[in-house]
Image: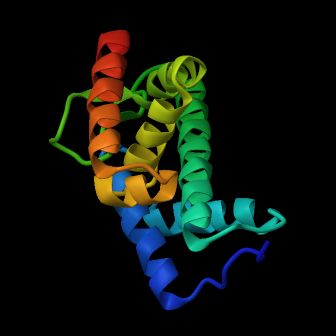
Amino acid sequence: MPPVPDLDDDLYAHLRAIARRVGEGQGALTLQPTALVHEAWIKLAGHPGFESRLHFLRAAALAMRQILVDHARARASHKRGHNATRTTLSGIPGESEAFDLVELDASLSKLQALDPEAADVVLLRCFGGLSIEETAEVLDRSVRTISTRWRHARAWLIANLA
């Protein structure tokens, strides 16, 4: 397996765009996109290798999710639960109702136990900033399958978070 890909300008710009989109859904999140990308990069640097650039992007999405949730937990514990970090389900502001990031992470973990592929779709869409088409490519599924999985996963998460 190839090691972590070189952080060329295109990859760095792509990761920053993802971090910016995910961060926009966070409301008052104090973690800047650059800091999120750098923390994710540090987390990924210890990985022995990736099968492809898309495999790397999936791992980066997971790393960003972990970093954002850890950051939200730290802020919530510091403020004793007040002003908890909220995010939209899509990671894109205005597209859906905002949820507490820690609660979304817990619900996503439950979904992972019930339907791992649906949880992967949510991970890649919400925390990876990937489109339906990109998600289909990463998961090696059809666009139609991913679109259906996305609709069902969102509905399940919204019901579970309500």
Task: Residue 142: tell me if it is visible.
Answer: yes
Residue 6: image quadrant is bottom right
Residue 26 place in picture, x, y as percent = 35, 43
Image coloring type: rainbow
The foreground one among 119 and 72 is: 119
Please determine whether, in this image, residue 52 is positioned above or below residue 124.
below
The image position of residue 36, as x and y in percent, is 54, 60
Quadrant containing the N terminus in the rendered view: bottom right
The number of numbered badges drawn on the structure is: 0
Q: Residue furthest left?
A: 94
Q: Residue furthest bottom?
A: 9
- At x 61% / y 43%, what residue is drawn? 66
Picture quarter with the C terminus: top left
Residue plotted at (61% across, 34% down): 74
Q: Is residue 88 visible?
A: no
Q: Please state which of residues 20 and 109 is positioned toward the viewer in this rendering.
A: 109
Quarter of the figure with residue 77: top right
Q: Quadrant of residue 54?
A: bottom right
Q: Position of residue 124 (x, y in %)?
A: 45, 49
Q: Residue at x 72, y 63 (%)?
A: 44
Residue under the point 43% across and 21% down: 82
* 45 in relation to 112, above or below: below
Tell whether 118 sits left or right of 66: left
The answer to whether residue 67 is above or below residue 129 is above
Between 61 and 81, the one lying in front of the other is: 61
Image height of 67 relative to 59, above or below? above
